[in-house]
Amino acid sequence: MGLKERSGASITTYDPEGQENWVTTKLDFAVNWSRANSLWPMPFGTACCAIEFMATAASRFDLARFGMERMSFSPRQADLLICAGRVPFKLAPVIRRIWQQMPQPKWCISMGACASSGGMFDNYAVVQGIDTIIPVDVYVPGCPPRPEGLIYGIMMLQKKVMAERMSDKRLRNEMEPDPESGLYLTPPAIDELSEPFGNSVNQTRSAT
Amino acid sequence: MTGPAIPVLPGAADAGASPPVTPKGVPHRGGTPNPTAAALSGKFGAAVHRVDVIWGETTVTVDGARLLEIVRWLHDDASQRYDYLSDVTAVEFRDADQPIEVVWHLRSLPFRRFVRVKVLLARGAPLEVQSVWPVYKGADWIERECYDMFGIVFRGHPDLRRILMWEQYREGFPLRKDFPLRGRFSRAEQLRQALAANPEARYSMEELTIAQAFEDLPGEMRERLAGGEKTGE
């Protein structure tokens, strides 16, 4: 510490070289810095992206470098939902429930093409992007993304967390779904988000 | 259109070519039929409509009304012993006149035989066949899947309901040819219906109660488990 006691005198002097153990900073910065570097992910792995996610967490890519070594398999102790893989309609209420169980502050990474857009599964069973169910902060493209890709997405999320202001109350508002339909977005917005693209525009939508 | 000529590989399209065979010399059609086929024809006569051998595998098309009887005989008869039902599925063809086929894959482990049993369901008639659940208990879930995907009703099944899609699913049977790939409803409506479901309501406690299932185990196995025996390491 910077306090030195002199024999015979009970006075405190200021020693500039001894003042290395305290800093002045903005509270926003300190809080965001600690949040960004200790994100606890809740892995929601449903497909091959989960395998890449496991590789990211393993020793070669070592997600622990980013403060994420503690996988939270309980949503109530998690900060970050990583949706790795396609989400079928049957799982839609499950991921919605998991998201609602996570306490604020919370973030979401949509990992891979299927979670972000439905990917090649433009069919009757798969949700066309989890952003139609829950809010998403970072989309990681790839099929599946390399661990480097996921880590880049995580670093982008850390940047986003660092830029947050505590005075901005909107950030922590829980999005309440419309009680009647259970949807966050309006039906036209969901239809637009789920529109076919690429090869699937050639498929017909109507029955017979 | 110009470009490099595409070489014609020997096959059915080339009139002069020899018919295709597998590396071990099994012809596409007309191989040796499984002895079960002849036994079935002898035993059930007119109920066996036709026998095909494709890539060495025998397919027997039978009368749907006598299916359970035939399958039971295949399972029980000492000369057949088809003790393993590997799959139940169905085939619908794009051609609207072709009947829908329901297919059972049966395997005899003692005799190392495989036979494929088919029943044709004519268009327009109700899609109903007999369940083989009384013979093979493993048919329970695979018949449910077949019902879920094709809408084929298995008469005599103890608990015929959807298994892959949720039970409130109202869009139809996804593997049928008249089912559009993206489903019948709009994405927003599909999502609304999916989110309206209670995730916990999908499982009946009946299915999950292990303690009750314990009573159904064979006595010898119950004894071992009750004694706290560890599984082999």
Image: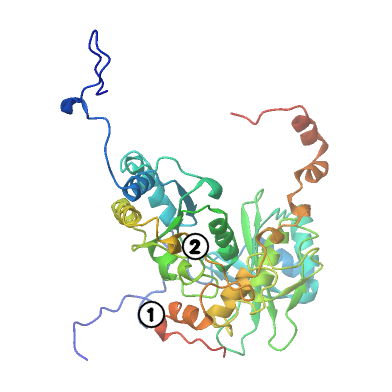
Q: Which mark is residue A109?
A: none
Which residue sits at x=77%, y=35%? B221
Which residue sits at x=70%, y=69%? B167
Q: From where the camera sits, is residue A154 visible?
A: yes
User: Mark 2 and mark 1, same subunit?
Assistant: yes
Horizontal and vertical percent position of residue A165: 36, 57
Horizontal and vertical percent position of residue A36: 36, 48
Q: Look at label 2 and name its amino acid.
A: Asn
Q: From where the camera sits, is residue B103 visible?
A: no
Q: Could you classify mark 1 by the number of other residues whose Cα lies within 10 Å: few (under 14), some (14-19), or many (20 or more)?
A: few
Residue A5 location, quadrant: top left
Horizontal and vertical percent position of residue A29: 31, 48
Q: Which of A103 and B111 is in front in this view?
A: A103
Task: Name the residue carrying label 1.
Answer: A197
Q: In this view, does A139 lie above or below A70?
A: below
Helix, strand, or loop for circle 2? loop
Which residue sits at x=60%, y=89%? B96
Horizontal and vertical percent position of residue A26: 30, 48
Q: Nearer the viewer, residue B107 or B36?
A: B107
Q: Nearer the viewer, residue A160 or B191?
A: A160
Q: Look at label 1 and name its amino acid.
A: Phe
Q: Does A151 sit left or right of B165 as displayed?
A: left
Which residue sits at x=49%, y=44%? A72
Which chain is disc 2 placed on?
Answer: A
Which chain is disc 1 placed on?
Answer: A
Q: Farthest residue toward the left?
A: A17
Helix, strand, or loop for circle 1? loop
Q: Is residue A160 above or below residue B54?
A: above
Q: Distance between the residues labelled 2 and 1?
A: 33 Å
Q: Which mark is residue A173?
A: 2
Q: Quadrant of the C terminus of chain B?
A: top right
